[in-house]
Image (tube, rainbow, N blue to C red):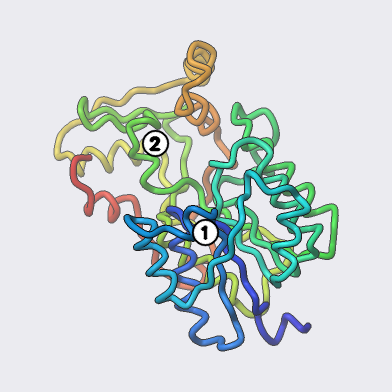
Amino acid sequence: MNTEKKPTNRVLILGAGELGIQVLRAMSNKAQKHADVKLSVLLRSEAAHAISGSRKARLDELMKLGIAVVEGDLQENSVDELSELFAAFDAVINCSGFVGGPGTQIKITQAVLKAAVARYFPWQFGVDYDVVGKGSGQQVWDEQLDVRHLLRQQNATEWVIVSTGIFTSYLFEPGFGVIDAQSKTVCALGEWQHAVTLTTPEDIGKLTADIFFHQPTFKNEIVYIAGDTLTYSELADLMRAHWGTEVNRKLLDRQKLRDDVQHNPQDVGAHYRLAFARPDGVAWSKRNTYNYRQGISTTTASQWLAKQHGI
């Protein structure tokens, strides 16, 4: 099939969570202009047969969007079982997240490659794992680098990585430990001039669909997107304007962050704070992004904050 002329037509999206649902909505919207494109979503059995609550509401929405449901379990199914499922599709977009636990992303990638799926968007909606490298303090990040190695070692499956930074909301989560609304404190990870790139799931969904259908086709490359890129110093200024009061600025240097991880090895936030305390790999200029080049507007941190209450 000549991918230059028409997009891959049978597309499977893995997961319908916070990011998956946004990708499904945006892909469905785009697919209306491409009659040959058929969308499916992989859900666990209990989610595929929900009869009440939010899961049932989600099934109803998927039906309205014209998206078929395929049953499978990314954790329980073996590489062979997943490969058999994936073989029916021309493209797989992986929105499964890290919930599957260690090894899941490698397993999914192995199954995609074994099925010889023509095009794969892996779960790499995050930082630049090539720049970060191994030993960031985040085990799942090490695995993400292994996924990239697997993809680069073969040439049967074309891949596209969408680098997004963190979800905008995560920067403001109390558990991340950067913004404390109670005490009006902003913490810098490593240095005040270190920066972080963030994008909302809605923008990631829209841009992923756009990148998927873009001509000429993206092949075997990393596409950077960003809702916003801020230094911690700029973030403190933003919060001062948002709160309308002076903020407590607190620098958490790498030694302090390393100590936190050592003393609280189970604290996910502590591991993330250490991993983000770096000058590169976790942020890129908005001017170097796909959305900037295409003139597509995205939600900035300031715009996102304006819609929130209690932060």
Q: Quadrant of the C terminus?
A: top left
Query: Type of residue at label 2?
Result: Tyr
User: Residue at 32% of width from left, 55% of height from top?
Assistant: 53
Near-viewer residue (252 or 148): 148
Residue bearing the label numbered 2: 232
Residue bearing the label numbered 1: 225
User: Residue at 67% of width from left, 85% of height from top?
Assistant: 6
User: Is residue 1 found left or right of 286 in the rendered image?
Assistant: right
Q: Quadrant of the N terminus?
A: bottom right
Q: Residue furthest left?
A: 244
State the image coordinates of residue 95 (x, y, percent, origin top left). Answer: 55, 55
State the image coordinates of residue 149 (x, y, percent, origin top left). Answer: 78, 47
In the rendered image of this protein, does residue 175 appear above or below residue 226? Answer: above
Give the image quarter of residue 211: bottom right
User: Is residue 225 found left or right of 140 in the rendered image?
Assistant: left
* Element marked by disc 2: helix
User: Residue at 41% of width from left, 53% of height from top?
Assistant: 228
In the rendered image of this protein, does residue 227 appear above or below residue 190? Answer: below
- Crowd rating for badge 1 (residues with CA inside 10 Å; few <14, some 14–19, many 20+): many
State the image coordinates of residue 292 (x, y, percent, origin top left). Answer: 48, 66
Query: Type of residue at label 1?
Result: Ile
- Crowd rating for badge 2 (residues with CA inside 10 Å; few <14, some 14–19, many 20+): many
In the rendered image of this protein, does residue 292 appear above or below residue 256? Answer: below
Near-viewer residue (205 or 273): 205
Near-viewer residue (118 or 190): 118
**Where residue 142 is drawn, which disc sits there?**
none
* Element marked by disc 1: loop
